[in-house]
Amino acid sequence: MSDPGGINTSSRYIIPVSNISYVTPVNTDNTVESSDKVKPIECQTCKNRRYQDGSDEMVSFKTGGHIDPGESYAKVMGHEKEHVANAIAEGNKKNKELVSTTVSLKTAICPECGRAYVAGGTTRTVMKTYGDDPYSRNQKSFEGEAARGNRIDAIA
């Protein structure tokens, strides 16, 4: 769908806002249309956004840093893969088994410029431990109780 000016309006949404006489349309390529020419803008919210890891593992972004919104998916996913690699290494140790690992990414929209970006991520791992420590003994006891009686033939 095009308007008489030849601008594609199918991807634009008009939202009524009170007390605002004119809103400059922002394109997906982070430029602003004006009567003179198209010029790039720099969103201060995106420029000042910082990412920091809160886990106790040795991974990137421990001290925090800036990520460009266009690169946020690749960098946050790369960071979460560091957590996965650490879990795999831990699961390869003696008496341990990595049962599962899941990565979730959280997306958001910048309130200033409207760009979508990856706001953060979470890696969840499930590890099974074997051995002679108290935790493993309790786990074996629980598994034994849960399995007891499962192979009884009630008809006999």
Image (cartoon, rainbow, N blue to C red):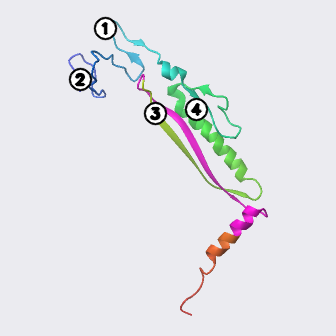
Q: Which amino acid does label 4 sit on?
A: Lys
Q: Is mark 2 on a helix, strand or loop?
A: loop
Report which residue position mark 4 lands on. 75
Q: Is mark 4 on a helix, strand or loop?
A: helix
Report which residue position mark 3 lands on. 108
- Residue at 42%, 20% (x, y): give it: 30
Q: Quadrant of residue 74?
A: top right
* Numbered badge on residue 35: 1
Q: Which amino acid does label 2 sit on?
A: Ser
User: How far, Cα to Cα, is label 1 from label 2?
Assistant: 18 Å
- Residue at 64%, 31% (x, y): give it: 61
Q: Which amino acid does label 3 sit on?
A: Ala
Q: Are marks 3 and 1 in contact (CB under 8 Å)?
A: no
Which of pointers 2 and 4 indicates the residue nearer the eye? 4
Q: Give the range drawn in magenta.
A: 112-140
Q: Around disc 3, counting alpha carbons within 10 Å, would you say few (fewer than 14), some (14 to 19), or many (20 or more)?
A: few
